Image (cartoon, rainbow, N blue to C red):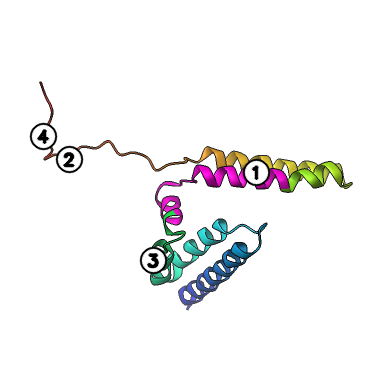
């Protein structure tokens, strides 16, 4: 019974995150990719068919596969995320008046998020393994 309930909650969460990802496609300041990554996680725990659908989607499937397999965040995504975070945080920090502790918390959160994004690889690792049946080039 507990396993069925857990699977059901993950399934509902997956659909909710897909919906938020779709909203992110339509609204310019709402992110899409993090919600789709969360949806893929939820579907991996609840529905293999829906998880495979996300992994094989023609628009964003390769991003999800790269993240799941190698923890890759493409350089374009890093640059976009960085610019959006800095734009979104700069106006409130510079021009709005609110408690300095909240400003510090907001700034620290953005710095931590940027550190996390930029410490991830931008490309899939190149495999240098040679197959055993490949002839060697020896002089």
Q: Secondary structure at mark 3?
A: helix
What residue would you read off at disc 4? Answer: 135
Q: Which label number is shown at residue 131?
A: 2
Dots 2, 4 in contact, CB < 8 A: no
Q: Which residue is mark 1?
A: 83
Q: CA distance from mark 1 to mark 2?
A: 43 Å
The answer to whether mark 4 and mark 1 are in CB contact below 8 A is: no
Separation of marks 1 and 3 at Cα, in angstroms = 31 Å
Q: Residues within 10 Å of mark 2 (few under 14, many from 20)?
A: few
Q: Label 2, label 3: how many angstroms apart (C-alpha)?
A: 29 Å
Left or right placement of residue 9 versus residue 92 in this view: left
User: What residue sits 57% from the left and 67% below the top?
Assistant: 22
Whichever of labels 4 and 1 marks the residue nearer the N terminus, that label is 1
Q: Position of residue 57 (x, y in %)?
A: 42, 64
Highlighted range, magenta: 63-87
Mainly helix, strand or loop, the magenta region? helix
Closer to viewer: mark 1 or mark 3: 1
């Amino acid at each position: 019974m507990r396993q069925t309930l857990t699977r059901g909650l993950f399934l509902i969460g997956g659909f909710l995150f897909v919906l938020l990802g779709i909203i992110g496609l339509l609204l310019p300041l709402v992110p899409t990719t993090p919600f789709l990554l969360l949806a893929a996680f939820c579907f991996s725990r609840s529905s293999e068919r829906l998880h495979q659908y996300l992994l094989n989607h023609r628009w964003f499937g390769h991003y999800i596969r790269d993240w799941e397999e190698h923890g890759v965040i493409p350089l374009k995504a890093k640059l976009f995320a960085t610019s959006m975070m800095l734009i979104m945080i700069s106006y409130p920090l510079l021009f709005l008046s609110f408690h300095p502790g909240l400003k510090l918390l907001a700034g620290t959160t953005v710095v931590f998020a940027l550190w996390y994004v930029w410490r991830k690889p931008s490309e899939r690792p190149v495999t240098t393994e040679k197959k055993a049946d490949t002839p060697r080039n020896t002089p």
